[in-house]
Amino acid sequence: MLELKNITFSVTEDGEKKEIIRGIDLVIPDERLVVITGPNGGGKSTLARLIAGIEKPTSGQIFLNGEDITEKSITERAKMGIGFAFQQPVRFKGIQVLDLIRLATGKHLSVGDACEYLSAVGLCAKDYIDREVNASLSGGELKRIEIATVLAKASVLSVFDEPEAGIDLWSFQNLIQVFEGMRREIKGSSILVISHQERILNIADEIIVLKDGELVAHGTRDEVMPQLAGDTESMAGCCRISELSGLAELKGLADRKGEDFKC
């Protein structure tokens, strides 16, 4: 279980203090898929970075399973079981996909075991296991490889910062299937996703809405979705994939790319 107590985060710009996160109190229980949404600039990604340890709060405390981790580094938090997937995955010239998965587990996995994680995210393992994690990979491929490393790590809390960013429609549809699979196998862990996407909101157990750095709503999907529907500002950035799918078909984009199929 993750608990945030009165978390604030501020920066100084042009000599003036600017509050990004304002007094957030939040509990993310075990075995839940929780989505944080809200208007652009509301503090969603900043909150994710605070949880992962990339940023340190100006004030307040963060607890993981009862232990205060506020002052712990990103490396220490990773060792405790917090996994983080960046909005834009990092490329590593000279490092193969197999190496990256082995690093995530901290074990010398066999090729067969590593391939299972790639298959779980919809990639044809034999086509990717020996590839370098570099610019030759598409945004969708990088996203799924990064998610495979999070799966391999077996995190107690997996944090995904706008996983839909920079990927095409068909890769996004595969991404939804990955999250649905993770939700089914969530035993002993939790998933936190930062997203504007309606289809991701629809598979959430709980939804949190941030606006101007403050928590303005938190509840089950059935409790919060009607509130979002009536909040035009919060929904302004949300994307209805069903509408995009229809548009894609009209434009002749229905042929799925080879990267979207499992072997």
Image (tube, rainbow, N blue to C red):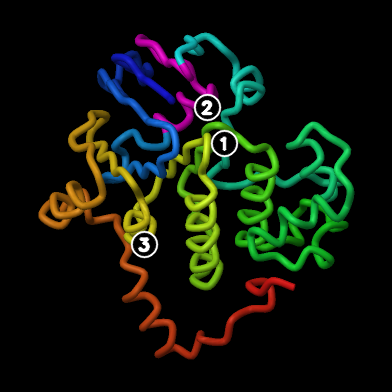
The tag on residue 199 is 3
The circle drawn on residue 52 is 2
Q: Secondary structure at mark 1?
A: strand
* Amino acid on which the number 1 mark rests in the picture: Phe
Image: 135 above or below 52: below
Q: Is residue 212 visible?
A: yes
Q: Which residues are magenta?
A: 46-65
Q: Are marks 1 and 2 in contact (CB under 8 Å)?
A: yes
Q: Residues within 10 Å of mark 2 (few under 14, many from 20)?
A: many
* Number of numbered discs overlaid on the protein picture: 3
Residue 245, position in %: x, y?
40, 78
Residue at 65% x, 65% y is: 122
Tell which of 182 and 56 is nearer to you: 182
Which residue in the protein does label 1 denote?
A: 84
The percent position of residue 52, horizontal first and vertical second, equals 52, 27
- Disc 1 or 3, which lies upstream in sequence? 1
- Which residue is found at the position 48% from the left and 43% from the top? 161
Q: Position of residue 154 (x, y in %)?
A: 64, 38
